Image (spheres, coloured by chain):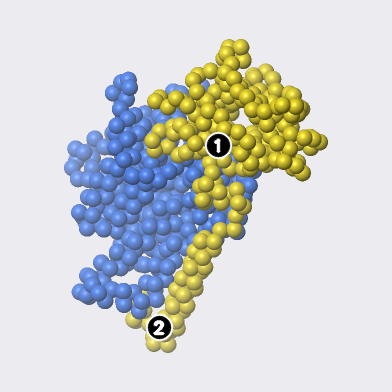
Chain colours: A blue, B yellow
Amino acid sequence: MALDNIVHVRGYRFPALAMAAVPLCFAISGILIRFAAFTVIWPDHSLQAYLESLCRWDCSWYIDISKHGYEGFPIPGESNVGRWGFFPLYPIVVAGVSGILPFSTANVAIATSIALSYASCLMAWQLLDRNLRAYVLYSAFLLSGPFSFYYTSVLSEPLFVLLTSCVFLALKRNNYLAAGISSALLSAARPVGVFIVFATVIRMFEEHRERGRPVLSFPRRVLLRPDLLVAILISPAGLFAYMLYLYLTVGDAFAFSHVQRAFGRVTGNPLQFLWDGFSETPTTGWLPTSPQWSAFACVAGLTLSAILAYRRQYGMALFCALGIVLPLLTNLASMVRYVVGLAPLILLSMVLLAKSRLTFYAALVLLPAACYFTTIAWMGGNLALV
Amino acid sequence: MPWSSLPMPRRRADFLAGYVLAALLAGAEIAVLGLALNPRVYPDYRAFYIDRTTTCLNRDRVGSFRLGETISFRYLGQRPKLMKRAEDMKVCGWSGAAGDGTHSLGKTSRLRVKILGVRGGLVATLEMAPVLRPPQTAQRVIISANGVRVHEATLTGDALQEFSFAIPQAVLADAELLDIAFDYPDSVRQTPVASNIYDRAIKLVSFRLEAVAAGGGTKSRAIDRTSAT
């Protein structure tokens, strides 16, 4: 009944079953497209080999954390790269599901990621104001799109996107406590997750202004409303819990940040990183180099953030801008993944593509088609997709 | 349900509970921040991860040697046991063995060996070649033994160079281990924006320790690359 109530599509009723079926269809088509791509570059065409082929880059870190947890110091195996840089919520979820299902951790992780992405699609229905075309495109992007391997393999992106959607949906309904609890979980999923607290404060301020109250009385109002205070203070709780855990395990609550040194990340001028990225022109052929793709992704992400701000979605805009600029302070690595992991940017992109019938149908064809080629690049270890 | 619509006693209780929860959260977060600002870590951890005063994270590696034995740091393919001798000595700041030797990584590299039963001083002999990026023409290597500076070598050109230097008895006295550190003030950064943990400076080809002989001191010579392989 509750589900049925939320599926009114601008004047007509869109059956709940159909709403649930859209992402399900794209989940299935995505699996088939990625499998087709896999058969091109992998000699062994078994299902297990397919699942293994999806496990790239950070995947093995998350699998190890799900199986063995975090190490102390000195790091076993005489490594200088600890697992502490990988936030715990996704591996905790995978470990929890692995404890129930009798399959390997990697297989469970992939199934969990698909389920989380599916849930993100359902969550998007309300965030997209029941815009059916945008909803279809969003489902296609997440589950059958050019970056669907991020949302359907062993990475924290599916959980991050789902929790981001939960926070913004709660904020849309002015349910600050739900937003705070979702934010707390988000802050334990990825380092930039904690910055969503600014979106909560911005929404509180907007609501304050909508009621005709003066700007200067906002701090007083927050202090006089313990529910708002709790919502703000609980938002970074996941990060603080992880920091406490690191302090007890490693002796350093900032180990997640300090370990970046072992990954060779250095802080620098983001504009310089962008310039360097664009300057790395291909020596042969016309396809952009990996740094160029990363720089393009950065600029596209920041442009979409600016559009969000223009559309007065200031909380989303700030969260996305911070989610791009902060990693950019250390270099362009993984920038494509960071940008497409920001749910508000994807939601906005799909709304823009759904505006006209032509772009909608073009995107509906191109997104799954691109999935095939990008999956080949992902399985082939393309550095732009790290 | 908005709090304003709750009955008065319940509203007051909820208010109070809200403030208590907010205070608990704030207190817990301030406490964790306090802990975060006062890490309780090993000196090696602090030097590498927090203070960033070294690029070489100390590890529990201790190799062994026989006096007069030359240990190769080249990739030896089918002779893993020989390669393991070198591997066991490499504490940090080294890449894997390659055909032209073991490349240094970062601003400092370290080797460590057991020296139980060694009486008197030692003479160390190293074969090394520099990693140079034009217009750079020389690579300085400052060598310390158990924290005491014992030698500074300047490597130039492409050719392998052999260096011998004395490690005085005073440095080894009562010590069970010999820890040799190589510092590279002129190390080559991989790219202008790369981390210094990936800096390159030398290729170490071989290492030998001998008992000090009368008149033993410091010497160096360039050797022909092909004859050294």
Residue reaching furthest bottom? B9
Three-letter code, disc 2:
Arg
Q: Residue at x 39, y 87 (%)?
A: B8
Chain bearing tag 1 is B
Residue type at tag 1 = Asp
Q: Quickly name the residue at label 1.
A: B183
What is the C-alpha distance between the residues marked 2 and 1?
68 Å
- On the image, numbered disc 2 is attached to which residue? B11
Q: Residue B161's quadrant in the figure? A: top right
- Tell me which label, 2 or 1, sits earlier in the chain: 2
Q: Depth check: give the residue in front, A320 or B116.
A: B116
Residue occupying the point 30% across, 21% down: A285
Q: Is residue A266 left or right of residue A365?
A: right
Please determine whether, in this image, residue A246 is positioned above or below residue B175. below
B211 horizontally vs A309: left or right: right
Co-location on one chain, circles 2 and 1: yes
- Visible in this render: residue A103? no
The residue at the far top in this view is B227
User: In the image, what residue occupies the spot 30% across and 43% down?
Assistant: A271
Residue B155 percent across, percent down from the top left: 52, 25
| Along the line of sight, the residue nearer the viewer: A229 or A94 | A229
Q: Are marks 2 and 1 in contact (CB under 8 Å)?
A: no
User: Can the viewer see residue B208?
Assistant: yes
Dot 2: what SS? helix
Residue at 63% from the left image edge and 43% from the top image edge: B147
